[in-house]
Image (cartoon, helix red, strand yellow):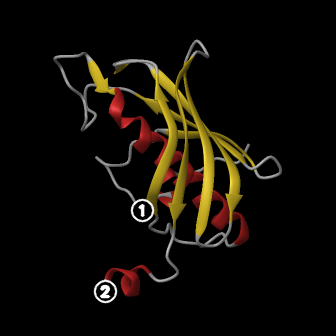
Amino acid sequence: MKKYNISDLLPHRPPMQLITAVESVDFDKQTLIARVDITKDDLMYDESIGGIPSWISLEYMAQAVGCFIGAADRENNPNAEPSVGFVLGSRKLSVNIPTYLVNQSYFVHVTSVFYDKNIANFDCQIYNSDNNLVASGAINVFRPDDIEKFMDI
C-alpha cells in the first residue's frame, strides 16, 4: 500500500492533527482506514478519565474523511495541497464508549456514499484494536472552491 504523510492530506497541524496514520485506501471501494493512537501528549487528553472524551469521535471521523479526500486529490495530482473542508452535519451518530483510552489504538473506517468536488457524504465507523465497534455515524462535508473567497462572505 502507498504510504501517506498526514500533513500532505490534511490542512491540520499538530496538535490539531489527530490522525496518526492512514492504514489503507481503496479508491475502487471508496474506502479509507485511519489509525488514531491515544497518548497522554494528545491535546484532548484528560487525566481525570485516563484518555480522551468520546465526544471527539466526530472529529476523528471528519479528519479520516479529510484524509480520504486528500488522498484522492493526490491520486489525481501528486502535488495537490490539502484543502479546507467543513462538516455540515452528522446523522445517526452513536458512541458506545465514554473514553478513548490512553495507550490504545482506534481505527476509523470511512466509506464514500456520495462525493463530488464540493459536497460529500461518508459512512463512518470507529473500531478498537479488538475490532469492536465503538462509534458510528454519517457525516456531510463541504469543500469550497476558493477558501479565501468563501471566508470573505
Q: Name the amino acid type tagged 2.
A: Asp
Q: Is residue 109 left or right of residue 93?
A: right
The one nearer the camera, 149 or 21, is 149
Q: Residue 11, which numbered label?
A: 1
Could you say whether the residue bearing mark 1 is in a helix, strand or loop? loop
Kindly report which numbered mark, 1 or 2, lies closer to the viewer in this rendering.
2
Give how far across and how far down residue 27 sits, in percent. Answer: 77, 52
Instruction: Please determine whether, in this image, residue 68 is positioned above or below residue 54.
Output: below
Give the quarter of the image for residue 121: bottom right
Q: Residue furthest front?
A: 92
Instruction: Please determine whether, in this image, residue 143 is positioned above or below residue 20.
Output: below
Estimate how packed mark 1 is, as few (under 14), some (14 to 19) or many (20 or more) residues with alpha carbons within 10 Å: some
Instruction: Please determine whether, in this image, residue 62 is positioned above or below residue 95.
Output: below
Q: Is residue 132 left or right of residue 147?
A: right
Residue carrying label 2: 152
- Residue drawn at x 52%, y 81% is 145
The one nearer the camera, 108 or 102, is 108
Estimate how packed mark 2 is, as few (under 14), some (14 to 19) or many (20 or more) residues with alpha carbons within 10 Å: few
Tally the numbered discs: 2
Give how far across and how far down residue 139 sits, in percent. Answer: 53, 49
- The answer to which of marks 1 and 2 sits earlier in the sequence is 1
- Residue at mark 1 to residue at mark 2: CA–CA distance: 19 Å
Give how far across and how far down residue 35 sits, in percent. Answer: 53, 33
Q: Residue 88, which numbered label?
A: none
Could you say whether the residue bearing mark 2 is in a helix, strand or loop? loop
Q: Name the amino acid type tagged 1.
A: Pro
Give how far across and how far down residue 153 sits, in percent. Answer: 32, 85
- Residue drawn at x 74%, y 42% is 1
The one nearer the camera, 93 or 142, is 93
